[in-house]
Every structure is written in structure tokens, then in C-alpha cells.
Amino acid sequence: MKFSKEERSWIMYDWADSVFSTIMLASVFPAFFVEMAGGTGGSMWWAFGNSTARFIVGVFAPFVGSLIEFKSYKKRLLVMFIMLGVLFTFATSFIYTWQLLLVGYVFSRIFHAAAFQVYDSFLPDVTTKERMDRVSATAYAFGYIGGSTIPFAISIVLITFGGDFGIGTDLAVRISIVITAVWWGLFSIPVIKNVTHKHEKEIVKGKVFKSTVSKAFETAKKIWRNKGLRIFILGYFLYIDGVGSVIQMATAYGAEIGLSTQNMIFALFVTQIVAFPFSILFGKFAKSIGSINLIITSIIIYFFICIVGFTMGFGLEEEFFGIDTATILFFVLAILVGTVQGGIQSISRSTFGKLIPKEESGSYFGFFEIFSRFAAILGPGIYGLIFSLTGRPSFSILSIITLFFAGLVVMVYGRKHIISQIV
């Protein structure tokens, strides 16, 4: 399928912004921050900073979504959020106190999420309903092979071998942060330059605040009254919390059962590589198999991911096998995650885009953003509860399967209602 200039430009933003998710959220920066915080409870403050950013984004998402529907606001806010996100990310590379480092990160995290929300809402502007699955999936694929892989590989080389060239670990991490900011800003140019808001509305002068708030509440009512959309949102909330929990808890679980950090980082790299072709395949088969069927299939695969995770820990706990076998199982888990992680997220985004009216994509995606940003709230809580009751990491990771089961029930039950709404 040949993409239009607008579609290509929109796809490139995933290539641009994924670098932040990989280096700042998942791998390099978290370890750097915890080490800088030293004995002050670094992991606690890291968790607090992330929770604060998620909460702020979640609270304001519906109102940002309503505002960007009005004439000229969508493009302006996209540019503003990207610029501020890049600026705060760049600034963190020059901060040498953990308190200010956390503040800089929280602001960059907020603007990164806000920019992605506005970017998501452009999907109905740049393509048609028939092409939406393919465009969304290709964007995720390029995010994995571009921003999630190339800068990550450079960072790994800098941190691992930089000492041979006089580059210490501290400097290597700071260079990685600069690379993140430059990569994000540079590859954002196509979406800023070529994508336009086609379904904008006029706004009464002097009534921006009132119009934005009333529009947010009006959209909430419309979502609730639309049975197909309401069922999809509920199912999405459940299974995407499971997806987010697997992403968030995988390395912590691996460390808990004694896997080496180096092996886990390499496994994360493998996940990015595997996710690239499979994200494209999801977009290719969405039309023939059906987007809802693909989502249901992905949820079932996550059942097996949870079972592999359980087997890995349970085998070590019961001494059925050693750390080498557990490491192999962790790589199996990483590969399985790569087959569905990008696909389930991209197809969920495009399915939501097909369920909503194009002229109100901003306000609807504002509510979609709430569930995306509040993902991985239930899962870690369930994990912690089971761990406190059993003291067994294996049973704790297995407990996340309950979210996928609940999501599967909702999606299977509501399948006909959702499909009829798309048609």
C-alpha cells in the first residue's frame, strides 16, 4: 500500500517520539536517576514522579482534547507540546541534582504524553477509515525500528564501551539524553510541516474556556450513550492495563528472581526488533481478519506470556531448573511480547479512530488518552497484593492474567456491537 505525504509524515512522528519512551521511560534514564538519588529512595521518587505526570496528563486530557477541535488550536498545541517536551528533555542532560532532575523529567513526561495525544487525534485527519489500521500499525512499526532501536543501540554502545574512549557512564547517559531530545525534535518536522487539521470548528471569541469544558462533558455523555464505543472503552481499559503492567513489571520481576540486568536489557532490545515486522503484519491482516479478532487473538497470546513468566519464576522457586533456563524463558517471553505489543496498541488506536466521528476526534481521543495514560494501575496493584499474600513473584506475575481474562470477556461479549458501530 502506498502512503500519501500526510500519512508518511504522521507515521514519522512515531519514529520521532518512540526514542523518549525507550531511553527516558524504560531503560537508560530510570537507572541513571535511581543511581543519582543514591540512598534517598530513588525508586520511590521515580515511581512518585511517574504517577504525578500520569495523573496530570489524565486529568487534563479530556479538556486538551476538546480544545484541539477548535480552529487552529490542534496544530499550535502539537508544536508547543513537542517544543516544550524536547526543551525539558534536553535540559535534564545538564542537571546534576536528583531533585531538579526529577522535576525536569516530570515536565518532559507531561509534554511528551500531551504531544502524543494531539498526534493520535490527527489520525482521522490524515487517512480514511479503510486505511486507518494499516497507517496506525505502520507508525508503531517505524517507532520500534527507529526511535526504539537506533538511538537505544547507540546508547548501549556508549554506556558499555564509552570508557575505552574516555567517556564515563555519567557522560554516556547525558549524551544519550541529548540524542533523545535531538532525535525527537528533528524527526517531528514532517508532522509539523505537512499534517493539517481538516475537521476543525469555529469558536466564539472570548468563550474558549467555557466551550472547552462544555465540549468535554458533552463528549463524555456521547461515549456513555454509544453502546459499541462504551463496551470497547471498557475492554480496552482492562486489557491495556494488562499490557502496560507486563511492560512495567517485566524487568522488576526479572530482577526479583535473579536475572542479570545485562540480559534483560538485551531482551528488551530483542522485543523492539521483533515488534517491527509484527506491527506491520497486524496492519496488513486487520482488513482480512478483522481488527477486533486481532485484538482478541493478541489478548489470548498475552495469556501465554503470563504463563511463561509464571513458569520462569516458579521453576526457580521450586528448583526445577537453574538461572540459565530461566534466562532462556525470559528471552522467549521477550519475543512473545514483541509479536503483539505494538500490534495490539496500534490496532486499538485505529479501531477507536473508526468508532468516532472525524469532526470530533480531538475530544474523543482526549478520553482515549485517559485510559492509555492510566494503564498499568490495576496490574501492579494486583501484583503487589498477591506478592504480599504469598511471597512468591511467580504467582504475582501470573495474577496479571486476570486483567486479560476480563478484557477478553468484554471484547468477546461486545464484538458484534463494536463491529456494527464501525460499519
Image (cartoon, rainbow, N blue to C red):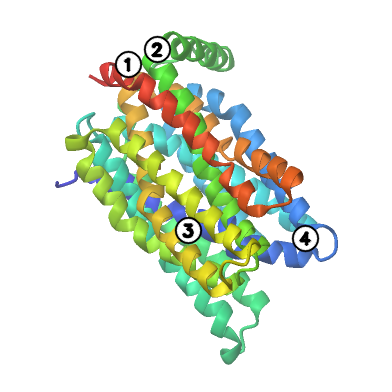
Q: Nearer the viewer, mark 1 or mark 3?
A: 1
Q: CA distance from mark 3 to mark 2?
A: 37 Å
Q: Residue furthest right?
A: 40
What type is the residue that disc 3 sits on?
A: Val
Quadrant of the snapshot with the C terminus: top left
Q: Residues within 10 Å of mark 4 (few under 14, many from 20)?
A: many
Which residue is located at x 54 percent, y 72 percent?
A: 263
The residue that disc 4 covers is 98
Residue 380, position in %: x, y? Answer: 64, 43
Q: Is residue 108 visible?
A: no
Q: Are marks 2 and 1 in contact (CB under 8 Å)?
A: yes
Residue 82, position in %: x, y? Answer: 50, 46
The residue that disc 2 covers is 227
Q: Quick one: label 4 or label 2, which is nearer the N terminus?
A: 4
Q: Where is 211 relative to 96, above or below?
A: above
Q: CA distance from mark 4 to mark 2?
A: 47 Å
Q: Secondary structure at mark 3?
A: helix
Q: Residues within 10 Å of mark 2 (few under 14, many from 20)?
A: some
Q: In which quadrant of the rendered view does residue 198 lie?
A: top left
Residue 417, which numbered label? 1
The residue that disc 3 covers is 19
Which residue is located at x 37 percent, y 63 percent?
A: 273
